[in-house]
């Protein structure tokens, strides 16, 4: 289950890499390249750290990625289809201005609530594997740096050990 959940989250975070041309063109204003050239959203506490987050994502993926995140991750929103496939339900708000890092921060708690106690390193390892399978070039170090910058940019008080 932990690897499957990480895979599903990675699939959402990288979906813009698999969009049809028409959809990709419609989302062009929300790519990492476009976000890097625009002012930080008003709710960002530290625009410099936000720039670091966007730059880390552009390095890990591609400047053409539309960074999607903010899944409403909780055990109640995981379902197994008849064919055994696990799906995420009840996506709260997929936002193209935040990146998927808040979902990464949420993963340990969701897995714990679902009965899977994993170390922060194991959760990060599963996420790194899942995103690498979808073309990302994260390393543990660059992902941890991006998480620290994300916390600074957004005012998030804890990364629950994911940045250690």
Image: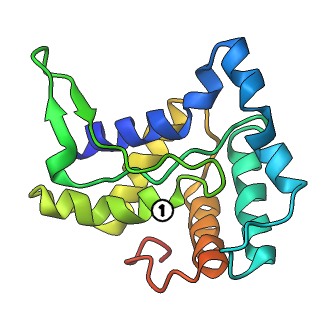
Write down the quadrant of residue 29 in the picture: top right
Counting from the top left corner in percent of width and height, residue 81 is at: 14, 22
Above-or-below relation of 39 to 47:
above
> What residue is at 69 percent from the left and 40 percent from the top?
61
On screen, residue 77 versus residue 164, left or right, reads left
For the N terminus, give its image quadrant. top left
> What residue is at 73 percent from the left and 81 percent from the top?
46
Residue at image mark 1: 102
Instruction: Identify the element where label 1 is drawn.
Output: helix
Write down the quadrant of residue 9 in the picture: top left
Q: Residues within 10 Å of mark 1 (few under 14, many from 20)?
A: some
Counting from the top left corner in percent of width and height, residue 54 is at: 74, 57
Above-or-below relation of 114 to 43:
above
> What residue is at 14 percent from the left and 49 percent from the top?
76
Q: Is residue 161 visible?
A: yes
Counting from the top left corner in percent of width and height, residue 154 is at: 60, 76
Residue closest to the eye, 151 or 68: 68
Counting from the top left corner in percent of width and height, residue 128 is at: 48, 47
Above-or-below relation of 50 to 155:
above
Q: Is residue 117 visible?
A: no
Residue closest to the eye, 34 or 162: 34
On screen, residue 106 versus residue 117, left or right, reads right
């Amino acid at each position: 289950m932990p690897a499957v959940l990480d895979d599903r989250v990675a699939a959402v975070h990288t979906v813009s890499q698999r969009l049809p041309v028409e959809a990709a063109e419609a989302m062009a204003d929300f790519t990492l390249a476009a976000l890097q050239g625009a002012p930080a959203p008003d709710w960002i506490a530290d625009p410099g750290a936000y720039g670091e987050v966007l730059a880390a994502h552009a390095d890990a993926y591609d400047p053409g990625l539309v960074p999607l995140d903010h899944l409403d991750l909780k055990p109640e929103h995981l379902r197994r289809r008849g064919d055994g496939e696990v799906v995420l339900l009840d996506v709260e708000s997929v936002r193209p201005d935040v990146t998927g890092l808040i979902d990464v921060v949420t993963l340990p708690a969701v897995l714990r609530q679902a009965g899977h106690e994993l170390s922060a390193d194991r959760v990060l390892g599963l996420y790194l594997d899942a995103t690498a399978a979808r073309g990302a070039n994260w390393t543990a170090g660059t992902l941890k740096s991006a998480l620290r910058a994300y916390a600074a940019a957004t005012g998030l008080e804890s990364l629950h050990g994911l940045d250690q």
